[in-house]
Image: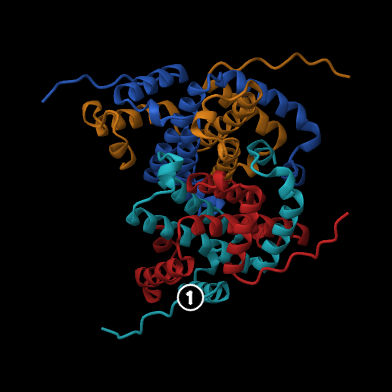
Chain colours: A orange, B blue, C cyan, D red
Amino acid sequence: MTMTPPPAPIRNLEELRDRLRTFAAARDWDQFHSPKNLAMALIVEAAELVEHFQWLTEAQSAALPPEKTAAVADELADVLIYVVRLADRLDVDLFAAVSSKLARNEAKYPADRVKGSARKYTEY
Amino acid sequence: MTMTPPPAPIRNLEELRDRLRTFAAARDWDQFHSPKNLAMALIVEAAELVEHFQWLTEAQSAALPPEKTAAVADELADVLIYVVRLADRLDVDLFAAVSSKLARNEAKYPADRVKGSARKYTEY
Amino acid sequence: MTMTPPPAPIRNLEELRDRLRTFAAARDWDQFHSPKNLAMALIVEAAELVEHFQWLTEAQSAALPPEKTAAVADELADVLIYVVRLADRLDVDLFAAVSSKLARNEAKYPADRVKGSARKYTEY
Amino acid sequence: MTMTPPPAPIRNLEELRDRLRTFAAARDWDQFHSPKNLAMALIVEAAELVEHFQWLTEAQSAALPPEKTAAVADELADVLIYVVRLADRLDVDLFAAVSSKLARNEAKYPADRVKGSARKYTEY
């Protein structure tokens, strides 16, 4: 039995990216991690997330019991892992991408015009 | 015409979470953001990502022209936005979740046993 | 200007399968229709379906205005097209597959034991 | 032990629709089958299909071993079940929808102009 220290907690996306690089390299799995395949893996994990909510009402989905929240957290982790891995393989700067996206969304949906409106909201 | 300073760049997931809170609150959109609905929105964005790759070979997906990479980055941003928003609504600590997940994956797929094996890889 | 008769209406899955074969062959698109790619295309269409419902309440989703129902019908058609095309490429008999599946579901969820129970329903 | 005859094989979409109606009614599950929920269930099944292909090459996906084809057939059946169930709940005529869709696709992609062209194909 080998004594290995427990892995360090991950504190930010850069550390996550690096851990995923090491993980894939140690297993020689980069060959499977084409962007095409990673996009497929990402949506499969997204669907495992959706599966938790498919028969719940919206109200039930907002009041999950703790063990269900833990299961959902696990799926969110899987999605995040593939987002970070795919961004890394494509040399995409995720924070630049979300900054740009949010700035455009803020301009596209001016708060004073779309406030509380489901109609506006659903029509973009 | 109003002069508003450009929005600040987002540097980490906590800043992204806070910007998304402000964005939704200013538009009174929390009412639409049940976990059930956010999970649906997340998978829709994941599919827009998949769409970019569906007719490409794996090799083509790893050598995208710059404008295509930019479009993919945009979709990755959308997925990340919904991951962070959904985690926030469920009080999920994303870094705790990925730390736990990766530790389990590292134990489940010992590098020396699964190295380079597509068979092992595809059978989990 | 050529005068072509309007295409015949499709009346069953066999006719749909044959029209899709002709369509792909005439365009030399079989080369893009690997099962992997068709599965991706299928889920992208499924997501376009989901997109129509993501911000609606369940009640709203059951009372769509006619033009929205037409748009949803269009997406259902796209999903069905890829189901039939993928089954054809894999030599899968769809009616044998659904017959077998339904027989198993009927045995797995005995009506007298699961009747009206969301709990049972959500736990499979 | 009750002796029930084996369920009849399903031969067309109308029979499938009717079997699904009976199945849901007997279990009092119509209450869970809002179009919103059915769309979620459909994409979850689509993802189970995608999962079979995510780490395969396109060539491997076109040469599945028999037991894998059977598993994929099972997922195709699940997707088809939700397509038919959702169409039924929305009073959508699936064959009218696919006839209309195919007629438009045939006009949109003239065989003589798009033949064998990945570029054209990927740009719609």
Q: What secondary structure is found at the residue carrying circle 1?
A: loop
Three-letter amino acid code at the position of disc 1: Ile
Q: Chain of mark 1?
A: C
Where's the C terminus of chain B, which quadrant? Answer: top right
Q: Which residue is mark 1?
A: C10
Q: Position of residue D123 (x, y in %)?
A: 38, 58
Quarter of the image for residue A113 reads: top left
Q: Position of residue B120 (x, y in %)?
A: 77, 42
Left or right: A42 with respect to A1? left
Residue beneath the point at 66% across and 33% down: A24
Quarter of the image for residue A115 reads: top left
Residue beneath the point at 72% across and 45% down: B122
Quarter of the image for residue B104 reads: top right
Q: Is residue B45 visible?
A: yes
Identify whether C13 is placed above or below D88.
below
Q: Position of residue C119 (x, y in %)?
A: 66, 35
Q: Position of residue B6 (x, y in %)?
A: 25, 22
Q: Is residue D124 visible?
A: no
